[in-house]
Amino acid sequence: FNQFSKASGLQANLGKSSIYFGGVSQTDQELILRNLGFTKGLLPFKYLGVPLSTKKLTIMQWQPLIEKIVARITSWTAKKLSYA
């Protein structure tokens, strides 16, 4: 991260950042967390309203996003389509 910070002028905000692991041993996780100083995040979580996980999500986990998409499409059809 130091090389990235020096090259870009950007720095990671440790208070807002977490690391998410999938398929990484507990020993390696602890080593990474200790060296980088980030907190460990838990999966699944939502990023921009989309559930993210290392495993296949269930229909229940997708349902809120599906409902938003259907509502948006319904809104578009009501505004943009005429029955004339």
Image (tube, rainbow, N blue to C red):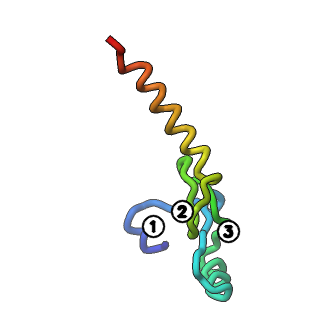
Q: Measure how far apart labels 1 and 2 are at the Cα level.
A: 8 Å
On residue 39, which mark appears?
A: 3
Tell whether label 2 touches label 1 (CB within 8 Å): yes
On residue 12, which mark appears?
A: 2
Picture coordinates of residue 26, whole percent (x, y): 67, 85
On residue 80, which mark appears?
A: none
The residue identified by callout 1 is 5
Q: Measure how far apart labels 3 and 2 are at the Cα level.
A: 12 Å
Instruction: Say above or below: 6 vs 26.
Output: above
Instruction: Say above or below: 29 vs 54.
Output: below
Q: How many marks?
A: 3
Question: Is 20 or 32 nearer to us in this picture?
Answer: 20
Frontmost of labels 1 and 2 is 2
Question: Is 55 or 17 nearer to us in this picture?
Answer: 55
Say which label, 1 or 2, has the lower sequence index. Answer: 1
**Residue type of the residue flagged with mark 3:** Thr
Identify which residue is drawn at 59% across, 82% down: 24
Which structural element holds mark 1? helix
**Residue type of the residue flagged with mark 2:** Ala
Which structural element holds mark 2? loop
